[in-house]
Each structure stands twice: as C-alpha cells, then as structure tokens.
Image (cartoon, rainbow, N blue to C red):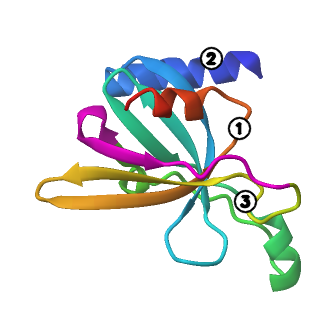
Amino acid sequence: MDEDVARYWQKFEEETGERVEVKGVAEVYEGTDGPGAWCLVVLTDRNLWFRQMPSSNWIASLFQGRSPVAASRRPDRDLKIPRGSILSLDDPGSRKWFSSPAFPVLTLAWREGEAVRNCRFSLDPSTDLRASLRKLF
C-alpha cells in the first residue's frame, strides 16, 4: 500500500512538473447546503490543486438495488489555482465538537483573468496544509 501511495505522488509530480509541498483531503462545497465532493488538496511549488477522486458509493447502492459502479477520475473536474493568483483565505478558526461539517469551512478567493472566484471547503486537520495555506499571506 505504501508503495502504491509513493508511486501515485511520483506520477503526480511527473505529470504536473511540480514539486508537492503538502497534501490533504477536503470536502469542497459547490452550493450553499448539502454534502460536498471529496477531493485531494495538493499545494505544490506553483499551484494549489483540488483533485476530485472517483469512488464507489456502496451505501447508495444498497438503497438503489444495484451494484456499486466504480467511477473513473475526470481531470476536467480538477481545480488548479496558481499560487500567485490567490487573494485570500477566510479561516473561521476551530469548530466545536459534533458540529456539521466537522471541520472548519474555509473560503479561498483567487483571481482568474478579470474575475475573482471563490471555493468553500472543509479541510482535514491531520496535515499541515491549513498552516501552509495561511503562510501564503
């Protein structure tokens, strides 16, 4: 398993030409309510990546009466934000136990052309990614 993980990150660096500095898992919210999409969050020497990962939803398949179908990864769903375009990170601080979502909801703002875009996400606190994002400012 550890070898598979090491190969994944080696392949990521080869494909992107970027050096991974820190990585984690986040739930990205597209709307104002409801569950988000789980993805890998990767801070490299040049970009911040939100890379959605495929999954088989076996719990949903129990209610739909069919076998889970493994989804394939869609690179068009990846979000790549150049570090130099990041404008702000709204970080509300720690959350109380048993709150939903369990982790703080952060809001990242960045410039894309003439527009300012935002992304809301809950970041797994078990990595240094949150601290690394704060250091960008």
Query: Residue shown at 47%/23% (left/top)?
Result: 11
Q: Foreground residue, 62 or 45?
A: 45
Asked which secondary structure carries label 3, the reply is loop
Q: Where is residue 54 in the image (x, y as percent from the top left)?
A: 60, 53
Q: Mark 1 points at which residue?
A: 125
Query: Residue shown at 35%/53% (left/top)?
Result: 109
Asked which secondary structure carries label 2, the reply is helix
Q: Does the magenta stretch include residue 88?
A: yes
Tag 2 and tag 3, C-beta contact below 8 Å: no
Q: Which amino acid does label 3 sit on?
A: Ser
Marks 3/1: CA–CA distance:
24 Å
Q: What residue type is labelled 1?
A: Pro
Mark 2 Cα shell of 10 Å, populated few (<14), some (14-19), many (≥20): few
Q: Which stretch did the figure color magenta?
A: 81-96
Marks 1/2: CA–CA distance:
21 Å
Q: Quadrant of the C terminus?
A: top left
Query: Residue shown at 85%/69% (left/top)?
Result: 59
Residue 30 in the figure: left or right of residue 123 = left
Q: Position of residue 9 (x, y in %)?
A: 54, 22
Q: What residue type is labelled 2?
A: Ala
Q: Mark 2 points at which residue?
A: 6
Q: In which quarter of the image is residue 77?
A: bottom left
Q: Quadrant of the N terminus?
A: top right
Asked which secondary structure carries label 1, the reply is loop
**Residue 93, labelled with which disc?**
none
